Amino acid sequence: MSLPRSAIVTPALHEMYMDEHSMVQMGMVVRHNNLGVACIESGAYERAGQYFRRALDKASETTFFSLPQSESYIKPGEVSRSLYIYQRGEYDEGMHTFSDPFFLDVAFSTMHSATATILFNIGQLHLRLDNNEEASASFLRALHIAQWSNEDILHDSEEGVCVMAILHNIGHVQYRSGNYEDAVRTYAKALHLAKNAFCKNSHRMLEVAATLNCLGVLYFHLPKAETERAMELYVESLAIRNAVHGVDCESTEIATTLNNIGRIYYMKGEHDKALELYRQALRMRRSLLGSEHLDVAATIYNAGQTHHQRGDLVEAMELYKEFLSIARKRLGIHHRDVAIMLKCMAQIHHERKEYESAKQFYEEALSVGKAALGNYHPEVASTLNKLGNLLYEKGDLENAIRVYKSGLEVERAVLDVFHPNVVVTLTNIGQIHKLRGEYQAALRLYKEALAIQRNSLGAAHPNLSATLSSIALIHYQTRSFSKSLDVYQEALRIRRDAYGDNNLEVASTLNSIGLVLFKMEQHELAMQSFQESLRIRREVLGKDHRDVAIILYNIATIHMEIGNDDEAMNFYRETLRVERTSLGENYRDVVLTTQHVGQVHQQRGELTEALYYFQQALDLQKAAPQQNYGAIAQTLNHIGNVLLQRGDAQGLVHAFSEALRFLRLGGKSNDELTVSGFNFYGLSKMHPECAPVA
């Protein structure tokens, strides 16, 4: 929405201050101001500034009113560094209301109103030059004069428009500077003025609608977004616009509000509603603005992002490509939003496990991001970390840790020392050190992450429990069982305080504590911990969940250790039943448990039963879509040893021959075979792979 093309003042003020000399001076002021406006519109900003300065100097020579000292409302502090695709000047959120400079008309101007108008126009010039401090000072001085010149601004007249426009621009600068709460207060004043001044003028109610939309944008972008309040304001704005224009009318303002409402639904996870609104907004924007307008691109991005969240990867990729095409043409190939879109496309390839394509897009996003933003920027750090995740998933740990460290360097340079992203990166690097057996390096990084969390979140925040569990696991792996137990118990206390007793995170921690106690040979306490974990998992997940099988297996192992063989076998069989129900026959854990049951029978001398379970395991392994020749050879080795115990020479020769054949198929040596009757797994499945990370 634009300002009226001339400023209007009251005849009383005009007559009070105008004489012949003043009229000459006013003519010069008006001429310089209007030349400055023309220069702004043509992009000649330096010349515009020169004309406005001359106009202001001439106005100051005549008026007795003292200009207030230049000042700025902008407070140093929290300015958002987010690269969310809105909050930027290229895209319309409806925040550019009253964004045109004023022309002056000598017949209707006083020197005071002219001075306020010139200051307003200077503020507009500074906005175009991204000089927020100077823009703020100019608008505040304009507001001071406008309010002094016309105190009765809350009525249905043209004089209120100037104050409304100034308030909108002050609020906009506050928004651009990240001072959202100040901006809310400023726009609230503008809304109060608009509702009182224009409540009986249906056309002027569009200015009320514009102000409602601006307030909605601010509530959306608050550090703790107030989405419900934003939605109320957007809906009220849309209702006014539909009432004035008609429900079937297309306008850029309506399209913008529809787009903004869609973003609320997206944040709430109501993706179907979001997509419907984006489609309406996109149809209007394409019709009114053309297919290659940046606002069209913004809605395309939003729709793509929504499809991405829904898992509609084909639709998301098509929309991302369309956005990228428009952005490259309109913004250039080295723009921050081009980098963001390349990263989004990389993520789709990543999710599809198309690793090489994903890597190429991440690297291109990184190159464009550095060209647009410099080497040290949050967006660069984000792309580095996603590339690190990709390399980690590929198993390229050396390059993954290198990229993570680069990301950490950027984060430490541009983010707060206690920022949660720093914690994530420290943890990722620690995980790689742990996998490589570099336990002390991993422990140091986890402790650094924990210190940051305690400082920023407090000692009882549930996020600490995951880091504590990682530290405890390293102590477990380095056989520092007492330290491990202490740290797990702290994690358990935090999780119980945060979530209550019947929570899966609590159950996971109890399982980990049980494993530590088992290693400490505290079998009774370990059993209690496992049983409590089993109770929670059965209650929350049901009796046939794979995580229930893990606890059953651990309980069976304790029974086996303390000599309760029959009870152990009951739990092993129940483990096998649950795994088959939840995972299917061909899952690796089913095979391992089947083998283990066979080994327990073999140890007890129940060779027929042992042979039965080993044969079942072998059948499952051979039926798998991708055969593991080494694992098949190992199972045949077990069968051969049972047959050796039974004295079945012909059978054992066949089993060992087959085992040798599969070893060769897998490129293994004959040394992998063992000829004995008692080659057991022991407790090698203390940390089965399907267990959640402690």
Image (tube, rainbow, N blue to C red):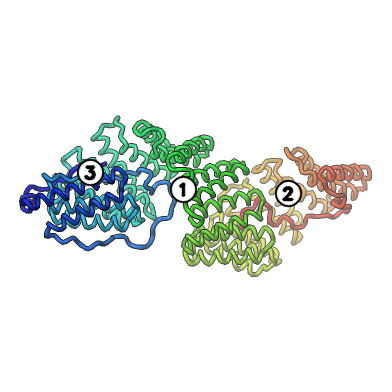
Taking the spot 42% from the left edge, 38% from the top edge, the residue there is: 297
Left or right: where does residue 45 sit relative to residue 373? Answer: left
Amino acid type of the residue that numbered disc 1 sits on in the rendered structure:
Arg
Q: Quick one: SS at disc 3?
A: loop
Q: What is the C-alpha distance between the residues marked 2 and 1?
A: 52 Å
- The image quarter containing residue 288 is top left
| Residue at mark 3 | 3
Residue 96 screen position, x and y as percent: 30, 45
Q: Nearer the viewer, mark 2 or mark 3?
A: 3
The residue closer to the viewer here, 183 or 138, is 138
User: Which residue shows up at 52% across the image and 60% down it?
Assistant: 422
The residue located at (62%, 58%) in the rendering is 431
Q: Which numbered disc, 2 or 3, marks the residue that appears first in the sequence?
A: 3
Mark 2 crowd level (few <14, some 14–19, many ≥20, 10 Å Cα): many
Does residue 266 appear anywhere in the picture? Answer: yes
Which kind of residue does numbered mark 2 sit on?
Thr
User: Which amino acid is tagged 3?
Assistant: Leu
Quarter where residue 401 is shown: bottom right
Q: 493 left or right of 295?
A: right
Give the mark, 2 or 1, whose residue is nearer the N terminus: 1
Does residue 77 lie above or below 188 as drawn? below
Q: Position of residue 194 (x, y in %)?
A: 20, 47
Q: Using the image, determine if residue 489 lies above or below residue 627.
A: below
Callout in the foreground (2, 1)? 1
**Circle 1 — which element?**
helix
Residue holding disc 1: 336
**For marks 3 and 1 on the same chain, the one whose residue lies earlier in the sequence:** 3
Quadrant occupied by the C terminus: bottom right
Q: Position of residue 447 (x, y in %)?
A: 57, 66
Task: Using residue 645 as the reference point, say whether residue 399 is left or right of it.
Answer: left
Q: Which residue is mark 2?
A: 593
Callout 2 secondary element: helix
